[in-house]
Structure formats: structure tokens, C-alpha cells
């Protein structure tokens, strides 16, 4: 039987604890039981979790920990040492820049054979300095999901892909947990973690950057923000759905895929003449990237001249 606790009572800690452990055999209050019944009907709590007891939360903000404990039907701890002593497994779900500090504190306690993970996408288990000497089993566990709130994000975790990196024993523990929940996951090395996070940023934050560039172009001749959102909604969601369903090669369309040099030259000239130098640079780089996929899709088509145009040769 594993007793589990969370350090950090924000949206990540609450969402992960609700998803992973709300079907454990811990006795919950009425509020927790009502939530569990509702969630069971949504098939969020799939998996046999009788081997886990969720203890509760510690946070620098006692109020946040108290709220998180109420939501999960667990306990609030006013001292991190008490939570560490009580638990076999600890999640550190604080902001990234606080993880090292939290580890520095809890590593001064008796943590031999305890399983400890953080949930940062960018940091590796290397942040747990001296763990081997302390006898702790450490790793990083990260869901490829934008966890936006405490109330609903836990329901999206059933479809999330996870990454694991760190000590073999800790990875084995969390692999079993993810297998029980039915989530897919990939085991990374420490060296892989930064590239993994860069890739995640491309598919989440930087997409917003592309939207902002498109919005800037449309707003320059009268589109309102609402016009832009409504105008791109079907196009963007349709393309993303196609990408996820069919993959890059089968979903690729547009002037680059067609090798439409005339259209792309007009695009580049307009961006250059109207002073959108940064957008022009991004356009060139991204188009060169998708030409790689276009060549796979259309091996009989010659993209050499188009590449020269994009490289200004």
C-alpha cells in the first residue's frame, strides 16, 4: 500500500491527484464522494487503484492547501516534514523555479526508499541533487497537456500522453500507475528533456505566436479581434484535427505542397514591401520545413526552385 502526498496545491497538483487517486480506498467526505460518482460516470477514474491512499497537500499557502484538500477529500498539512514523514510517494507540483528549493528542504528529512517526482516539462530529475546518497527514488513525470484550472483539467488527463525520466525504480512505479490508468507514455533520458520541452513549446505556446502574426496582418486592414477569431476558427481547428487524425504528410495542403512558386513569391514580396520583416522570416523558415513533408508526399515533384526562392538564392 502506497501513501501519496502532493507538495504544491495549484492546478497541476489538484488535477493530478484527482485524476490518479480519487478512486483509492481512502475514506472521503460527502463532497468527495459526490465528485467521485460524477467522475466515474465520465470514465475518468478508470483503473484499479486499491494499492494507493491519497493523504493530502502541503503548500506555502495554507488556504490553497486547505481548498485542495476539500476538493479531494484529503488532509491539509501545515508542515512539509509531516507530509514527507507520512508518505511513501511525493509529487512536487510547485512552479519550476521552486522545485530545487523544495527538494533542498525535504532532502534534509529521512527520505530513504521514498519515491519522489516533480512535474516540470523542462527540468530533469537532475534537480534532485544527492538523491542517491539519501536513498530516494526520483524522477520527473510530465503530461503533454495544458492544465488550465483545478475544476476541469483533471478530466482531460485521461487522454494525455506522459513522459517519464529518472531513476529506474521510480519510473517502474509510475509506469505501472499510468498503465493502470490507460495513458500512453515515453521514457526519456536526462539529455532528452530539453528537446522534449522545446517540442512541446512549438505545439502549444508558439502556435499562439503564429496566430498573433496572422492577426496582425488581418487587423492592418480592418479586421477586429473578434473577426480574426471567428474567421480562423474553422480553418485552424479543421487543420489541427486533420493533422492529429491523418498525420503531417496526408493532411498537408496549400501553396508549398503544390509547389506554387508564383503565389509564394507574391506572399514574400507583400510581407517585405509592407514592412513585415519578422513575419517574412518566419514564413520562409516554416515553409522550408513543410517542403520536407511535401517531398515525402509528392516524390515526383521538384521543389528545388521553390527552395531557392525561400532561401533568396
Image (spheres, rainbow, N blue to C red):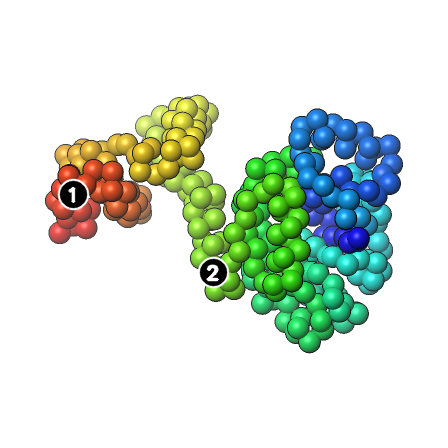
> For residue 152, what is the image quadrant?
top right
Position of residue 100 in the picture relative to residue 303 (left or right): right
Position of residue 110 in the picture relative to residue 218 (left or right): right
Position of residue 72 in the picture relative to residue 297 (left or right): right
255 or 128, nearer to the observer: 128
Q: Residue at the bottom extreme?
A: 133
Q: Which mark is residue 97?
A: none
Q: Which mark is residue 192?
A: 2
For residue 192, above or below residue 206: below
x and y, in percent, of residue 51 in the image: 77, 48
> For residue 243, what is the image quadrant?
top left
Number of marks in the image? 2
Q: Which mark is residue 303?
A: 1
Q: Secondary structure at mark 1?
A: loop
Earlier residue among tags 1 and 2: 2
For residue 248, above or below residue 127: above
Contact (Cβ within 8 Å) of mark 1 with mark 2: no
Residue occupying the point 14% across, 34% down = 262
305 or 298, nearer to the observer: 298
Cα gap from disc 1 to disc 2, whole angstroms:
33 Å
x and y, in percent, of residue 181 in the image: 64, 41
Residue occupying the point 70% across, 36% down = 45
Residue occupying the point 61% across, 58% down = 171
Residue occupying the point 55% across, 44% down = 184
Crowdedness of circle 2 by 10 Å Cα count: few (<14), some, many (20+)? few
Q: Secondary structure at mark 2?
A: helix
Crowdedness of circle 1 by 10 Å Cα count: few (<14), some, many (20+)? many
Asked whether residue 4 is in view, the answer is: yes
x and y, in percent, of residue 44 in the image: 67, 34
x and y, in percent, of residue 196 in the image: 47, 54
Asked whether residue 146 is in view, the answer is: no
Amino acid at each position: 500500500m502506497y501513501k501519496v502526498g502532493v507538495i504544491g496545491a495549484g492546478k497541476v497538483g489538484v488535477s493530478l491527484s484527482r485524476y490518479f487517486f480519487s478512486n483509492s480506498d481512502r475514506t472521503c467526505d460527502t463532497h468527495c464522494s459526490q465528485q467521485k460518482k460524477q467522475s466515474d460516470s465520465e470514465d475518468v477514474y478508470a483503473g484499479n487503484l486499491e494499492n494507493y491512499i491519497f493523504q493530502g497537500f502541503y503548500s506555502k499557502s495554507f488556504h490553497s492547501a486547505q481548498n485542495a484538500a476539500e476538493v479531494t477529500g484529503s488532509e491539509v498539512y501545515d508542515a512539509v516534514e509531516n507530509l514527507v514523514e507520512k508518505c511513501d510517494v511525493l509529487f512536487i507540483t510547485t512552479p519550476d523555479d521552486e522545485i530545487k528549493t523544495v527538494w533542498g528542504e525535504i532532502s534534509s528529512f529521512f527520505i530513504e526508499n521514498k519515491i519522489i517526482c516533480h512535474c516540470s516539462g523542462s527540468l530533469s530529475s537532475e534537480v534532485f541533487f544527492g538523491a542517491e546518497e539519501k536513498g530516494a527514488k526520483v524522477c520527473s513525470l510530465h503530461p503533454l497537456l495544458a492544465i488550465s484550472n483545478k475544476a476541469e483539467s483533471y478530466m482531460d488527463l485521461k487522454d494525455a500522453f506522459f513522459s517519464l525520466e529518472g531513476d529506474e525504480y521510480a519510473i517502474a512505479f509510475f509506469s505501472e500507475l499510468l498503465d493502470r490508468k490507460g495513458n500512453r507514455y515515453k521514457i526519456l533520458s536526462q539529455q532528452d528533456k530539453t528537446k522534449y520541452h522545446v517540442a512541446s513549446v512549438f505545439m502549444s505556446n508558439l502556435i499562439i505566436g503564429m496566430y498573433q502574426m496572422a492577426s496582425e496582418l488581418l487587423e492592418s486592414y480592418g479586421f477586429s479581434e473578434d473577426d480574426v477569431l471567428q474567421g480562423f476558427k474553422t480553418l485552424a481547428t479543421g487543420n489541427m484535427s486533420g493533422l492529429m487524425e491523418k498525420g503531417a504528410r496526408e493532411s498537408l495542403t496549400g501553396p508549398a505542397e503544390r509547389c506554387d512558386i508564383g503565389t509564394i513569391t507574391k506572399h514574400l514580396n507583400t510581407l517585405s514591401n509592407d514592412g513585415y520583416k519578422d513575419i517574412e522570416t518566419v514564413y520562409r523558415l516554416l515553409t522550408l520545413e513543410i517542403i520536407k513533408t511535401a517531398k515525402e508526399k509528392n516524390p515526383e515533384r521538384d521543389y528545388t526552385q521553390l527552395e531557392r526562392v525561400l532561401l533568396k538564392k
